[in-house]
Amino acid sequence: MAGNALQSLGGFPVVLVIFAGIAIFLVLRLRSVLGKRIGFEKPPFHPGMAPGPQSGPVIDGQVLPASAPGRTIPDPQSALGQRLMQIVNRDPQFDPPEFLTHAEAAFRSIVTAFSAGDRTTLQSLLTPHVYQTFEAAISARGPSGEQPRTEIKSIRSVSIEDAQISGDLAAVIIRFLSTQFTQQLDAAGNPLPGSGEQADLCDIWTFERDLRGKDPAWRLSAARSG
């Protein structure tokens, strides 16, 4: 009678109660390990679907668990979030948090390259039309040898302002709030007296990419002050 009592409880096997408890414990552990979704995850990979390119020279998507401080990611349920999701669905490598990381890196590189007159770097980061504008400005500095030098002191925030798809062309508009120091240098590279100026600037840049193209790079296609 005692042995039967250990094997059943009111006609319900005790062993099933034990296994049910173990299953609940494992489910809770899995949820803690897997973590939470941030809303912009890609659809699961299915056999037969070709993965997109793994990296790009300018801006390429890699999954990040969350946005970094100073970087604003739109709510995935908002109208802007839904437009970003359209790009995610077309480009398996696009991820908004990582996009902002690479956009900030591109911003720093472009500002520095333009200041130094580095045409090679600019050509790799800009669309042909924008490159022509930057190249003309560099050439207009004149034969005197004087040139400006710009240093980015800090970038306080980077945020996605808008996103659009027109046919196969995707565009993402980014707002940069930065503090920059500009100084005019003479032909020998020495600062001209009284030419130094520090200012807080708002720049709104548009990066674009052909979603059907083999090149995974996002390049600057428009720039204006905010």
Image: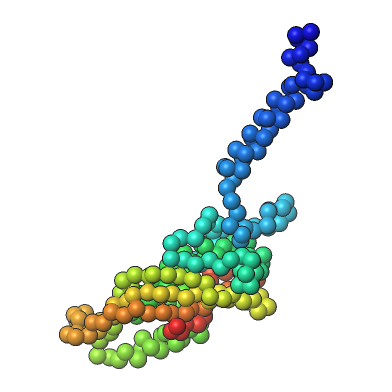
Q: Is residue 62 above or below residue 188?
A: above
Q: Is residue 84 above or below residue 37?
A: below
Name which residue lies at 42% across and 70% down: 157
In the depicted view, which residue is nearer to us: 104 or 50? Answer: 104
The answer, for residue 45, to whether it is visible in the render is yes
In the depicted view, which residue is nearer to us: 28 or 81? Answer: 28
Residue 66, horizontal then vertical, whole percent: 51, 57
The total number of labels drawn is 0
Name which residue lies at 43% across and 65% down: 70
- Quarter of the image where one finds residue 25: top right
Name which residue lies at 22% across and 85% down: 195
Pick the quarter of the image with the C terminus: bottom left
Going by the picture, which residue comes out furthest to the top? 1
What colour scheme has been applied to the protein in the rendered image?
rainbow
Say whether residue 205 is left or right of residue 139. right
Residue 222, horizontal then vertical, whole percent: 50, 82
- Quarter of the image where one finds residue 2: top right
Going by the picture, which residue comes out furthest to the front? 10
The answer, for residue 170, to whether it is visible in the render is no
Say whether residue 50 is left or right of residue 34. right
Pick the quarter of the image with the N terminus: top right
In the depicted view, which residue is nearer to us: 16 or 221? Answer: 16
Residue 168, horizontal then vertical, whole percent: 66, 75
Going by the picture, which residue comes out furthest to the right? 11
Name which residue lies at 64% across and 66% down: 77
Q: Is residue 43 above or below residue 149?
A: above
